[in-house]
Amino acid sequence: MDLDILILRDPRESVKKCSLTPLRGMAGLEFVNYHPDRRIDASGRILLDPEGEAFEPRDAGRSLFLIDCAWRRVPSLLQTVDGEPLRRRLPELSTAYPRKSVTFQDPSTGLASVEALYAAAWELWGPCPQLLEGYRWKEEFLRLNPRLESARSS
């Protein structure tokens, strides 16, 4: 299984706190820093969207487009996206990431970026345990989400 993941990352977010940082350089992942003048083509890719349709079997093997930013910044980053990505929502999952914001309330179903990435990859390609290798809360995330448990063997 070959990963094909495009990640649009908000450079305002701390690289040190970013759950995706350990994945930099991994084959099949391309990180692009957001800039208001840079256009990103997401045609035909799956875009995670809490308001999107549920994943479908026909989505298997498609490319993934992930936006890595604070929830409140998603509309700004989306303004730089061309094409018509297919909007899909993840099934209800629980985060293990200890979120804490003093300025904005996270959605109750929000996940850390690496958790969302792993869950979406699981929907598209099956278990990709390498995506959780550097994630500090991997074991807790898998315990909270037994449907993704098959990755524990890594």
Image: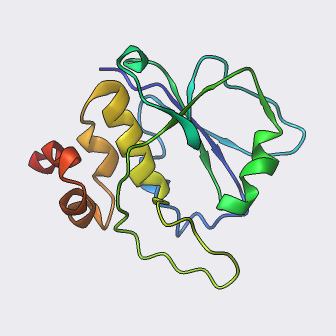
Image-based side of 137 in relation to 83, left or right? left
Q: Position of residue 72 (x, y in %)?
A: 72, 61
* 85 to 26, vertically: above or below: above
Residue at the far left: name it: 153
Query: In the rendered picture of this protein, how many numbered marks are placed on residues?
Result: 0
Q: Position of residue 41 (x, y in %)?
A: 72, 23
Q: Residue at x 26, y 30 (%)?
A: 126
Q: Residue at x 18, y 61 (%)?
A: 143
Q: Quadrant of residue 97?
A: bottom left
Image-based side of 99 in relation to 94, left or right? right
- Which quadrant is home to the N terminus? top left
Residue at the far bottom: name it: 102
Q: Which residue is drawn at 57% across and 23% down?
A: 45
Give the colour scheme of this rendering. rainbow
Depth order, front residue of 74/134: 74
Q: In which quarter of the image is residue 129?
A: top left
Whether residue 49 is visible, yes or no, is no
Q: Quadrant of residue 54?
A: top left
* 16 to 89, vertically: above or below: below
Depth order, front residue of 53/66: 53
Depth order, front residue of 149/87: 87
Q: Where is residue 61 in the image (x, y as percent from the top left)?
A: 39, 17
Whether residue 104 is visible, yes or no, is yes
Q: Where is residue 55 in the image (x, y as percent from the top left)?
A: 42, 29
Q: Residue at x 34, y 45 (%)?
A: 131
Image-based side of 12 in relation to 94, left or right? right
Residue at the far right: name it: 37
